[in-house]
Image (tube, helix red, strand yellow):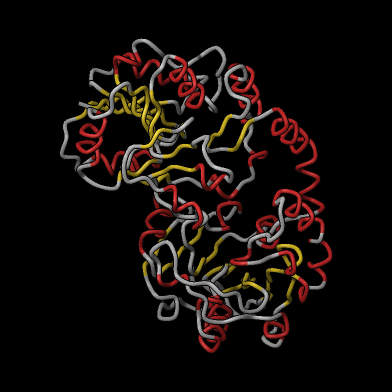
Amino acid sequence: MISVVCVYNNEDILKVALLRSLQGQTATFQSVLLDNRDGRYKSAAQALNEGGRAATGDFIMFVHQDMWLASDTWLEEAETILRTLPDLAVAGVAGMSSAGRHWYERMKFSISGFGLDERAEVGRVHKPEEVQTLDECLLLVPRHVFERLEFDETGFDGWDCYGSDYCLSAKQMGLRVCVVPLPCSHCTSRALYSIWQFKGLSKYQERLYRKHKANYKRIYTWMGTISCMDLRLRSLMRVVGPPYLSLFPNVLVLIRKELAGCESALDLGCGYHSALRVCDIPFSVGVDLYQPPLLESRRVGTHTQYLLGDIMRIAFKPRSFDAVIATEVLEHLPADQGVTLLRRMEEWATRKVLITTPNGYLEQEAYDNNPLQEHLSGWKPDDLRRLGFQVRGTGGLKVLRGDKGRIKYPPVFLWERISDLTQPLVYRFPKLAYQLMAIKLIAEAEPRPW
């Protein structure tokens, strides 16, 4: 039997994600839920150790509240796999190996690939594979191992790096750390932020490195590589990051600024990582034709309401939303349909229409098993100006980008910063930009129907 241990601080997310995916499980399991809405637990290690001690199953699953198990036989299959792995300390669904030159060669995972660079697909596992560390979203530990090795509450008295520490400590005991082929989803918006923006992460990465540097010159984790040089760079970014984003804003910062003050929004082709996640908008509706990313977005609670449907066929009353947005959508439509969509967006908005799209045609085929990802048109600044839009450039200079919009020169970190430095230029001269952001102000012609 597997004991499911989860510390949660949002009951709504817990219910719509983890608990809903546990409802139909074919295997018997023990549920140990630790309520942290009042902040009684000061660290993940403290909470999970308490839950682990209460566990009675042969295996303990330490899992985040926003995890979704992909099938009703998930726990049954997990237990079968775990019993075949001798000397196992901990298994998970996302981890990093030390083998491989590039980050995407080191990734090993069975979680949903939403938002992952398609180069990383080589890391999708079809059998258990050993790794250096695991992501903490889901950890499966044999109970007899947990009885010998608990999470370090002293060194990791917060909410980061406790899982990586557990993996490295277990390896010092001669035990194995593996990623196992158990499909699931992590319903999180973490991908919208840079590593340096996670409060507390750097502190615990430094502690992790100090504790294990005698055995590992470089520690590979799902949240980035940790070495002496990496820590120095992140320490610098913590200081310069906020003013850096102010001087060289990315598209999310620009969108948040444009939508400030809006109380409602319609997000067409919302996908799974909507830009509205970084905006303070009380009411929003997300629409997408492809169900998997829509369900992913629903589980993380990005929008107030959701519609599964074709954005070219849905209808709303005129002036229904303060803002209507379509980020990275126009290029997936033939040009004539794109023009029609923009006109309909203007009818539905009371204040603003906002779109983002690549500058010109950018070749892209379907991926993520989603045929709708193919690009069917290209848009230039003058095309949007003729339709009455103000056009700004984002994403830095277009000449720095290659296949699928990736930075084309090594080292990527350096050229990404150079691209950032060109942002003020391309903002004013969008013909030079990789990406376009277009805004149209709407004069409110009649009262809102709501």
Q: Position of residue 248 (x, y in %)?
A: 79, 54
Residue drawn 67% across the image and 75% down it: 359
Q: Quadrant of residue 228?
A: top right
Q: Is residue 183 above or below residue 239?
A: below
Corner quadrant of residue 240: top right
Point out residue 54 in the picture as x, y percentages from the top left corner.
30, 15
User: Where is the N terminus found, in terms of image quarters?
Assistant: top left
Measuring from the top left, give residue 153's x and y in whole percent: 50, 14
Give the answer, above or below, for where 204 lies relative to 343: above
What residue is at 24 percent from the left and 47 percent from the top?
71
Residue 290 sits above or below residue 231 on the image: below
In front: 439, or 63? Answer: 63
Image x and y of residue 350, in percent: 60, 73
Q: Residue at x 66, y 78 (%)?
A: 360
| 441 and 99: which is toward the camera | 99
- Residue shown at the point (47%, 26%) measured from the top left: 163
Q: Is residue 184 left or right of residue 78?
A: right
Residue 172 as seen in the image, left or right of residue 208: left
In the picture provided, is 398 more to the left or to the right than 6? Answer: right
Task: Tell me if residue 79 comes above or below residue 49 in the rendering.
Answer: below
Number of numbered markers: 0
Q: Nearer the viewer, residue 289 or 167?
A: 167
